[in-house]
Amino acid sequence: MTQITRTDRQLLPPLTPQQKVAVMLRILFHEGYDDHLAGHITFRQPDGTLLANPWELSWDEIRPEDVVRIDVDGKVLEGHWTVTPAIKLHLELHKRREVKWAMHNHARWSTIYADLKRIPPVYDQTGAGVPDSEICLFDEYDGDVAHVENAAAAAEAMGDHNIALLAHHGVFISANSTPQLLHRSIAIEWRSRQAWHVETVNPNAEPMKAEVANQFGSVLDQFGGIPGQFEALARRELRRDPTLLDG
């Protein structure tokens, strides 16, 4: 049998910041972050500007050349598209904290628990990927975050947490690296999906021991997630669309 080595595999080429945003959007779309035109990502650059997805395109069609650059007030500096008025949620967070990535969407499963005003229990190892200390629930909904007061209230309520379930709305996630954003996004969505299914089968099911789940999640999250996960899922997207990085 021929031994497969790392050099035999299709490795991910170096990505520009715009390519990272486009690839992240494609990956998350297929992970359940797929509410039509809703949702937004910002990626802070060394000069303080932010790369963001355009409002007019769905996450599964965005290409690197579609990514826009905005300032901290939301003004478009580069790009041919506009940004959503709801970008204020990100701007308020970036003004409060030095986070590199911020992502908001109405993901399929975590939004259910946001609607329930409940943080889902952990029932398996993958769902334990992020400790409870990173997750918070913002249980008020006074309107959409296109209004600066609502955006500011959500960002303020997030505090130092990196995953927020926004009641009757969706999920808001921050991170300081590309792999960490992907890891946190996958972990909360997986955790929510599994909790829903497990509790549907048995409403009295016993979750993982909190101390075990939190210890596992703390180590993995602080490490930045599973090594190679972003690269592996990026390669999957390139198999789906070999021209994704073109242009």
Image (cartoon, rainbow, N blue to C red):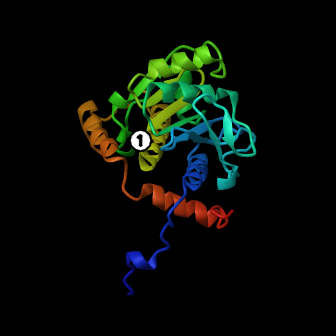
Q: Is residue 97 left or right of residue 86?
A: left
Residue 110, position as x, y percentages in the image:
52, 33
Q: How many marks?
A: 1
Question: Where 142 falls versus 55 (above or below)?
Answer: above
Q: Residue at x 51, y 58 (%)?
A: 233
Q: Is residue 204 left or right of residue 48?
A: left
Between 241 and 109, the residue placed more toward the observer is 241
Residue 39, position as x, y percentages in the image:
63, 36
| Placement of the N terminus among the 4 image quadrants | bottom left
Q: Is residue 56 left or right of residue 141?
A: right
User: Pointer 1: what residue?
Assistant: 176
Question: Where 8 falls versus 119 (above or below)?
Answer: below
Q: Residue at x 40, y 40 (%)?
A: 127
| Placement of the C terminus among the 4 image quadrants | bottom right
Residue 242, position as x, y percentages in the image:
64, 67
Does the image show residue 201? no
Between 3 and 154, the residue placed more toward the observer is 154
Q: Quadrant of residue 32?
A: top right
Q: Amino acid at mark 1?
A: Asn
Q: Is residue 146 left or right of residue 129?
A: right
Question: Where 154 falls versus 58 (above or below)?
Answer: above
- Label 1, secondary structure: give it: loop
Q: Residue at x 52, y 20 (%)?
A: 154
